[in-house]
Amino acid sequence: MPTVRDIRAMAGEETITMLTAYDAPTAAVADEAGIDILLIGDSVGNTALGYDSTLPVTVDEIASRTGAVARATDDALVVADMPFLSFGVDDAESIENCGRMLKEADADAVKLESGPHTVELTERLAQLGIPVMAHLGLTPQQVKSVGYARQGTTPDAAEEILELAHAHEDAGAFSLVLEHVPANLAARVTEELEIPTIGIGAGSDCDGQVLVVDDVLGMSDYTPPFATQFGDVRSEMESAISSYREAVENGEFPAEEHSHVEEDLDSLY
Ligand code: KIV
Ligand code: NA
């Protein structure tokens, strides 16, 4: 079982691979495939739960899915993504919500979409023994105020991200996700920080990369421009499900070998 300290130590040494997972079978496959970190992303809102943003996702939903992932995972670090308004409103409530992920769902760490409002909270959580992965750049929980645009594109905005990255490292975050920021900014943050950076749409100079598993598998009908489909699982599913429907409709399934006849009943029927 890797710990957050093992992940920290990978910075600059080994490339970190991270992938989202929302259920036990997917987690088991990703874990066996050697992924270092499994994130129960609040992207579960856009994927499995069918919402058009991450905002409606609840603490209970993340806790339930984190439990499923943790039960199926032997090697990867399991990180629970804290949903919109589950942190940052009130300290006690934030700590309780984050703590549930470790106490109830067996997560190894939590991820917080970060900003000036999460520096002190990150420090408090780290002191309490709840490891925090920070997340800067595009933070989809800000969709109503900021949208989904690339972040850190002006010198001032880039400087702000760099400063917040340092502030979260100093507060005790063990790693940092950088989403949808210019590659040269991500490279600069990676060079300046000691903790590992994990990029998504942030170029190739981060210490690691993360993608949403539905995008990797080719499950989604939309793939963001910074993702690549590494498979075509949606077509496989369509083909399997259509074959099942056809086999039932034309009487090929169930066949004799799928049925069980009890001879004692022959006198009755
Ligand atoms: O929710 C999510 O999947 C994420 C990753 C893309 C970093 O936050
Ligand atoms: Na997220």
Image (cartoon, grey):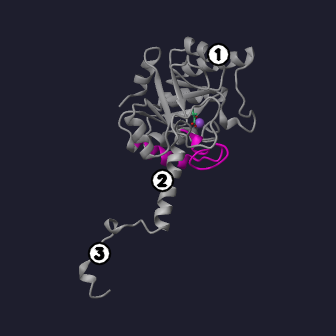
Which sits in the foreground, 50 or 249?
A: 249
Q: Is residue 39 depicted above or below 199 in this figure?
A: below
Q: Tell me the tag on residue 185.
A: 1
Q: Amino acid at mark 1?
A: Leu
Q: Is residue 46 depicted above or below 159 in this figure?
A: below
Q: Residue furthest left?
A: 264
Which residue is labeled 3 in the image?
Answer: 261
- Give the x, y percent position of residue 224: 64, 34
Residues drawn in magenta: 41-70
* Dot placed on the residue nearer the N-terminal end, 3 or 1: 1
Please tell me whether mark 2 sits on a helix, a strand or a loop. helix
The span from disc 2 to disc 1 (Cα, nearest Å) is: 44 Å
Q: Is residue 256 left or right of residue 235?
A: left
The quarter of the picture where the C terminus appears is bottom left
Magenta stretch contains residue 202: no
Q: Amino acid at mark 2?
A: Ala
The quarter of the picture where the N terminus appears is top left
Q: Amino acid at mark 3?
A: Val
Specify the quarter for ligand 1: top right
Which residue is labeled 2 in the image?
Answer: 240
Please tell me whether mark 1 sits on a helix, a strand or a loop. helix
Q: Residue furthest bottom?
A: 267
The span from disc 3 to disc 1 (Cα, nearest Å) is: 68 Å
- Give the x, y percent position of residue 230: 52, 34
* Dot placed on the residue nearer the N-terminal end, 2 or 1: 1
Q: Is residue 161 depicted above or below 54 in this figure?
A: above
